[in-house]
Image: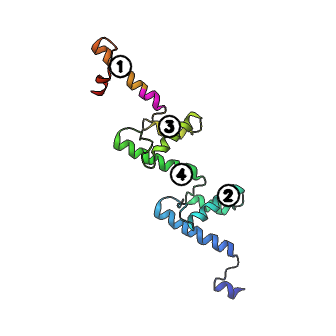
């Protein structure tokens, strides 16, 4: 046995494979600043997904959980994906001065619509709500349009003394 151990014989193939994958995800973490490889990466992304499943089932040892936690392993990718979309919306906000891209705006248009629906169902976390509010997120786009139209009508009345607001005037604005 001593001679075999001198040449680093692998006694537990599963542990050796796990450790090799862990070293690879550790390198990924050091290179990318996070430990959640994309699902497209069948090898490392698949391994990370398996670790999440094993963790949920309670099949991952404390030592392995601790190692993964040391590299800030993301156990729930739902929040990671939300965070990525929020960062995209934040960039949009900085560039355009608002946080309401059109529904068909790449990557985040539909996501913004979904956030409004999720908010109405009270399914956003307090942190998510606060982060969206920090970029002047509009929760009810219809209310926003109504308020904007009301302010135009009010200004028109103050200027003209009546509400006979014609289509021609609306087009000229």
Please tell me which of labels 3 and 1 falls first in the chain.
3
Instruction: Give SS at disc 2.
Output: helix
Please tell me which of labels 3 and 2 falls first in the chain.
2
Q: CB of mark 1 within 8 Å of CB of mark 2? A: no
Name the image quarter holding residue 26. Answer: bottom right
Q: Nearer the viewer, mark 4 or mark 3?
A: 4
The residue pinned by badge 4 equals: 80
Q: Nearer the viewer, mark 3 or mark 1?
A: 1
Label number found at residue 130: 3
The residue pinned by badge 1 equals: 153
Residue 35 located left or right of residue 52: left
Label number found at residue 55: 2
Q: Residues within 10 Å of mark 4 (few under 14, many from 20)?
A: few
Instruction: Give SS at disc 4.
Output: helix
Residue farthest along the top direction in this orientation: 161
What's the distance in space between the residues labelled 1 and 4, CA to CA? 43 Å
Q: Residues within 10 Å of mark 3 (few under 14, many from 20)?
A: few
Please tell me which of labels 1 and 4 falls first in the chain.
4
Q: Is residue 147 above or below residue 112?
A: above
Span shown in magenta: 140-145
Please tell me which of labels 4 and 3 falls first in the chain.
4
In which quadrant of the rendered image does the C terminus lie?
top left
Q: Nearer the viewer, mark 1 or mark 2?
A: 1
Q: Nearer the viewer, mark 1 or mark 4?
A: 1
What's the distance in space between the residues labelled 4 and 3, CA to CA? 17 Å
- State the residue at coordinates (57%, 58%): 73
What's the distance in space between the residues labelled 3 and 1, CA to CA? 32 Å
What's the distance in space between the residues labelled 2 and 4, CA to CA? 17 Å
Please tell me which of labels 1 and 2 falls first in the chain.
2
Instruction: Tell which of 40 and 126 is nearer to you.
Output: 40
């Amino acid at each position: 046995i001593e001679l075999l151990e001198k040449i680093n014989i692998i006694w537990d193939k599963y542990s050796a494979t796990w450790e090799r994958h862990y070293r690879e995800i550790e390198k990924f973490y050091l290179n990318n600043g996070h430990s959640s490889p994309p699902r497209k990466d069948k090898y490392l992304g698949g391994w990370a997904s398996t670790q999440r499943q094993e963790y949920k089932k309670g099949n991952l040892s404390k030592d392995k959980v601790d190692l993964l936690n040391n590299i800030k392993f993301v156990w729930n990718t739902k929040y990671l994906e939300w965070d990525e979309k929020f960062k995209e919306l934040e960039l949009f906000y900085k560039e355009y001065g608002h946080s309401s891209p059109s529904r068909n705006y790449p990557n985040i248009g539909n996501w913004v619509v979904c956030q409004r629906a999720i908010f109405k169902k009270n399914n956003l976390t307090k942190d998510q709500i606060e982060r969206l509010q920090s970029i002047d997120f509009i929760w009810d786009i219809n209310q926003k349009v109504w308020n904007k139209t009301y302010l135009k009508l009010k200004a028109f009345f103050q200027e003209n003394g009546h509400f006979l607001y014609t289509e021609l005037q609306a087009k000229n604005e």
